[in-house]
Image (cartoon, helix red, strand yellow):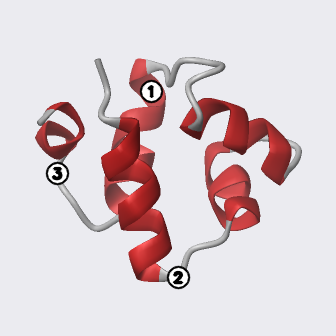
């Protein structure tokens, strides 16, 4: 299970907007990304390398 609190806190700490994350992951808008970050939808395996790069962390960090 991905630690969504870590993802949200890391994004906010780095000053990355929901829209920036949505763009990086190929989503149409920020509200779609928010649904992933809030746990309404589940991040897919192919999202993890993109998230890790954007959040400047390792994929393993998502599972701590």
Image height of 40 relative to 28, above or below: above
Q: Does dot 1 land on a helix, a strand or a loop? A: helix
Q: Earlier in the sequence, mark 2 or mark 3?
A: 2
Give the percent coordinates (x, y) of residue 25. 63, 45
Residue found 11% across the figure and 36% down from its top: 64
Residue found 88% across the figure and 43% down from its top: 28
Q: Which residue is mark 3?
A: 58
Q: Earlier in the sequence, mark 2 or mark 1?
A: 2
- Asked if labels 1 and 2 touch by Cβ distance under 8 angstroms, the answer is no
Horizontally, residue 59 falls left or right of residue 2, namely left
Return the residue found at the far right.
Answer: 28
Q: Nearer the viewer, mark 3 or mark 1?
A: 3
Q: Earlier in the sequence, mark 3 or mark 1?
A: 1
Classed neighbour count for the residue bearing mark 3: other residues with Cα under 10 Å, few (<14), some (14–19), many (≥20): few
State the separation of the CA atoms marked 2 and 1: 23 Å
Residue found 40% across the figure and 77% down from its top: 13
Give the quarter of the image for residue 31. top right
Horizontally, residue 42 falls left or right of residue 51, namely right
Image height of 61 relative to 2, above or below: below
- Asked if labels 3 and 2 touch by Cβ distance under 8 angstroms, the answer is no
Whether residue 7 is visible: yes
Residue found 80% across the figure and 52% down from its top: 30
Query: In this orientation, which residue lies closer to the viewer: 64 or 25?
Result: 64
Q: Which residue is mark 1?
A: 46
Image height of 47 relative to 40, above or below: below
Q: Does dot 3 land on a helix, a strand or a loop? A: loop
State the separation of the CA atoms marked 2 and 3: 18 Å
Q: Which residue is mark 2?
A: 15
């Amino acid at each position: 299970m991905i630690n969504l609190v870590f993802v949200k806190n890391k994004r906010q700490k780095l000053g990355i907007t929901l829209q920036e994350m949505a763009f990086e992951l190929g989503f149409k808008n920020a509200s779609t990304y928010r649904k992933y970050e809030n746990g309404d939808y589940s991040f897919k395996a192919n999202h993890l390398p993109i998230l890790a790069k954007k959040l400047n962390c390792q994929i393993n960090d998502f599972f701590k």
